[in-house]
Image (cartoon, rainbow, N blue to C red):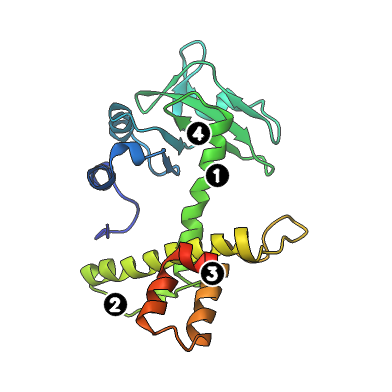
Amino acid sequence: MLLDKRGNSNTQERIDILAGFIKQFGKTSIRGVLADREFIGERWFKYLKNEGIYFIIRIKKDAKTTNSQGQEVPVQNLFRYLKAAEQLTLEDSRLITGVLVYLTALRLSDGELLIIASSKKDGQQAVEYYKERWQIETLFSCLKSRGFNLEDTHVTDPERIKRLLIIPVIAFCWAHRIGEGQHDSVKPIKVKKHLRLSKSIFKAGLDFIRNSIFNSTSFFNLTALFQFLDFNHFNASS
């Protein structure tokens, strides 16, 4: 959904996005909703809870909640004694924007507090799930400078941009799926000393597709093309 404004979406826009997803794929396909600190609010939290949608959302450290005495305090006060790498989940739910949620905090290595509000009391699992939110940043970089250079387009019409965006998103999924198959079954990506892959799963898949297109004389044969688009067939034949 393209917004005709600067900044992030409002509650109604987020509800519309989820409602559209649920209509198309069903609520049971949602494992959870991850969001950063900008995406909070009473109506938003209530919507997710009423729909039974599990959420893990980071909140600002100065968000207001209540302490064990029922006094209103900044949420960071409840976790001020945490040391680096220490994590704590409060035993009982607390009010954030007027909605009862479970709070978990992790003190990061730089001293900052990562505070998460979730609809379930799941502590460590909530933190592990929240780490997956970074994948959206990875997707953006793959769509732009590290992959498809989407920003190089001179298209300005919102509807045309919306249609244009569909193509690299599908291509990203395809490249990532191919990269997974290559890494798991064909040619594992080297791991560097800092334990990170020397090349991303996406880049490995994209390079494989690119090389297959330009190095295969039979690629544009219709049968070969369909086989190439069939990940399982192509992975097995590799």
Where residue 58 appears, x then y in whole percent? 48, 38
Numbered disc in front, either 4 or 1: 1
The answer to whether 91 is drawn above or below residue 160 in the figure is: above
Evaluate if marks 2 and 1 touch, with contact meaning CB atoms under 8 Å apart. no
**Label 2 vs 3, first from the N-terminus:** 2
**Quadrant in the rendering for residue 7:** bottom left
Q: CA distance from mark 3 to mark 4?
A: 45 Å
| Amino acid identity at mark 1 | Lys
Q: Quadrant of residue 4?
A: bottom left
Name the residue nearer the viewer: 201 or 157: 201
Residue, disc 2: 155
Q: Where does label 1 land, which residue?
A: 131
**Mark 3: amino acid:** Ser
> Closer to the camera: disc 2 or disc 1?
1
The residue beneath circle 3 is: 237
Q: Nearer the viewer, mark 2 or mark 3?
A: 3
- Which type of secondary structure does the marked residue at label 2 adopt? loop
N-term-proximal mark, 4 vs 2: 4
The kind of residue tagged 4 is Ile
Who comes first in sequence, dot 1 or dot 3? Answer: 1
